[in-house]
């Protein structure tokens, strides 16, 4: 854009210089013609011829060479350096551009001095190459300075805009109330500040809605969990009185249902909380995922032996990820619980972690049909285990995926030669 502007200015300057030189040539012709007419009037024809010869003998310093033609009424040459009379009417002092030789032109004017004497004065335009060269250098140097200044200004303006946008993004990432207040009350009411102000208000409104949702959810959960736990306590007291076997079985079953209901309620709240925090990095720290996975596998080792499973793990050291350590651990435990639940008797469970991070948990159970591989991540969806009994609340994998999404990870069920293969990797 700057180059186009400079070219436009150069064209205007060139045209202005050319027009100025042409006007100068016209003015010098008129002055010269008037002077020669006065000479003729005062000194006669012979004096006029001498003065024309004197002027032709002079070499002008500006390159605007003069040309003359003194002719009789028939146009025959009497004096001067032009050979023939051009197509200009001396009776009306006509002026115009005439040819000088085969390569040059000049501005000329013709006039009648007497009835039998006519005079033509023509001046070539001054040589403008030198001044154009100088102007060209000025434009070149000025253009370089102009483009450099424009680039510096554009870079500076771009840096300021990036810095302001960066501050806006930082305020949104941190969710700091003071930062949102600054965005909502900008000091410079330009477009960026207006957009930032509206976005800050939208974030604050969404936060208030989420806070109200959390408070309502927690209140509902509390109102439900408290009577259920009271009921569980009453069942425990009833069991302590050693009722008959049938009553004891029903009470134990009721207590299991209560605990499953409480676990489902807590899982639903955790899923909702994880989904609400997607993209929110507050509270996240760098977690040694390798050490975390290895620690969990060691804790599950005894449970695997008791269940008759072979638990193996291959952990690449030093795999780290930014996140909530407790939640990341819950992904691993939920995947292991799922593998324990659906593995075949005596089967192998393998846990592998590689840089990326990439966590793979496989079992040797019946596997999952392709049309159910997404359904297993839905809330309350339950498959039949190896014992053909429906187990669990169907919330474990849904919660694991919700936590994964909160950390920018994906949790999918991939093809496997036998059993199920769950893969946790960067989305």
Image (cartoon, rainbow, N blue to C red):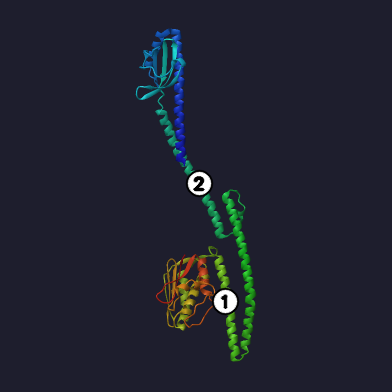
State whether residue 418 is above or below residue 357: below
Density class for disc 1 (Cα within 10 Å; few <14, some 14-19, many ≥20) is some
Between label 2 and label 1, give the one nearer the viewer: 1
Q: Position of residue 290 (x, y in %)?
A: 45, 70
State whether residue 98 is above or below residue 338: above
C-alpha separation, residue under disc 2 versus residue under disc 1: 57 Å
Tell me which residue sits at (49%, 64%) in the image.
408
Tell me which residue sits at (59%, 88%) in the image.
248
Splitting the image into 4 quarters, where does residue 345 fall? bottom left
Tell me which residue sits at (45%, 39%) in the image.
4
Task: Please name the residue that numbered disc 1 is placed on.
Answer: 263
Q: Position of residue 157 (x, y in %)?
A: 51, 46
| Label 2: which secondary element | helix
Residue 388 is labelled as none
Camera-nearest residue between 19 and 279: 19
Residue 156 is labelled as 2
Q: Is residue 235 left or right of residue 369?
A: right
Tell me which residue sits at (59%, 83%) in the image.
255
- The reply to whether residue 330 is visible in this rendering is no
Q: Residue furthest front?
A: 74
Q: Position of residue 140 (x, y in %)?
A: 43, 36
Q: Earlier in the sequence, mark 2 or mark 1?
A: 2
Camera-nearest residue between 374 and 329: 374
Q: Position of residue 329 (x, y in %)?
A: 50, 72
Q: Residue furthest bottom?
A: 244
- The reply to whether residue 412 is visible in this rendering is yes
């Amino acid at each position: 854009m700057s180059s186009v502007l400079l070219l436009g200015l150069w064209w205007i300057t060139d045209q202005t210089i050319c027009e100025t030189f042409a006007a100068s040539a016209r003015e010098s012709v008129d002055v010269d013609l008037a002077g020669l007419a006065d000479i003729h009037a005062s000194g006669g024809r012979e004096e006029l011829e001498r003065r024309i010869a004197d002027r032709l003998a002079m070499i002008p310093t500006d390159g605007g060479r003069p040309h003359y033609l003194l002719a009789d009424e028939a146009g025959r040459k009497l004096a001067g350096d032009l050979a023939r009379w051009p197509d200009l009417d001396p009776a009306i002092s006509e002026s115009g551009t005439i040819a000088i030789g085969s390569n040059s032109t000049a501005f000329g004017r013709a006039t009648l001095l007497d009835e039998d004497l006519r005079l033509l004065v023509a001046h070539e335009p001054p040589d403008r190459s030198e001044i154009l060269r100088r102007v060209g250098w000025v434009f070149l140097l000025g253009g370089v300075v102009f483009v450099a200044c424009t680039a510096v200004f554009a870079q500076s303006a771009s840096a300021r805009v990036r810095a302001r946008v960066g501050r806006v993004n930082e305020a949104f990432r941190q969710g700091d109330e003071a930062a949102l207040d600054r965005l909502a009350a900008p000091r410079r009411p330009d477009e960026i500040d207006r957009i930032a102000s509206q976005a800050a208000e939208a974030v604050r409104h969404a936060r208030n809605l989420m806070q109200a949702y959390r408070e309502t959810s927690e209140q509902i959960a509390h109102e439900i969990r408290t009577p259920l736990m009271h009921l569980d306590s009453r069942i425990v007291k009833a069991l302590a009185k050693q009722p008959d076997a049938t009553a004891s079985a029903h009470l134990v079953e009721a207590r299991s249902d209560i605990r499953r209901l409480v676990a489902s309620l807590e899982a639903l709240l955790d899923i909702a909380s994880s989904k609400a925090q997607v993209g929110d990095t507050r509270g996240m720290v760098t977690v040694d995922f390798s050490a975390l996975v290895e620690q969990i596998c060691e804790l599950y080792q005894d449970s695997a032996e008791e269940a008759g499973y072979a638990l193996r793990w291959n952990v690449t050291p030093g795999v780290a990820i930014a996140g909530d350590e407790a939640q990341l651990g819950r992904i691993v435990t939920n995947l292991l619980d799922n593998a324990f639940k659906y593995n075949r008797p005596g089967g192998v469970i393998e846990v592998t972690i590689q840089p990326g991070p990439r966590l793979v948990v496989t079992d040797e159970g019946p596997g999952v049909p392709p049309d159910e591989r997404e359904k297993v991540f839905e809330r309350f969806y339950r498959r039949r285990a190896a014992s053909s009994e429906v187990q669990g609340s169907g919330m474990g994998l849904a919660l694991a995926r919700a936590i994964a999404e909160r950390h920018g990870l994906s949790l999918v069920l991939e093809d496997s030669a036998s059993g199920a293969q769950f893969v946790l990797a960067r989305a």
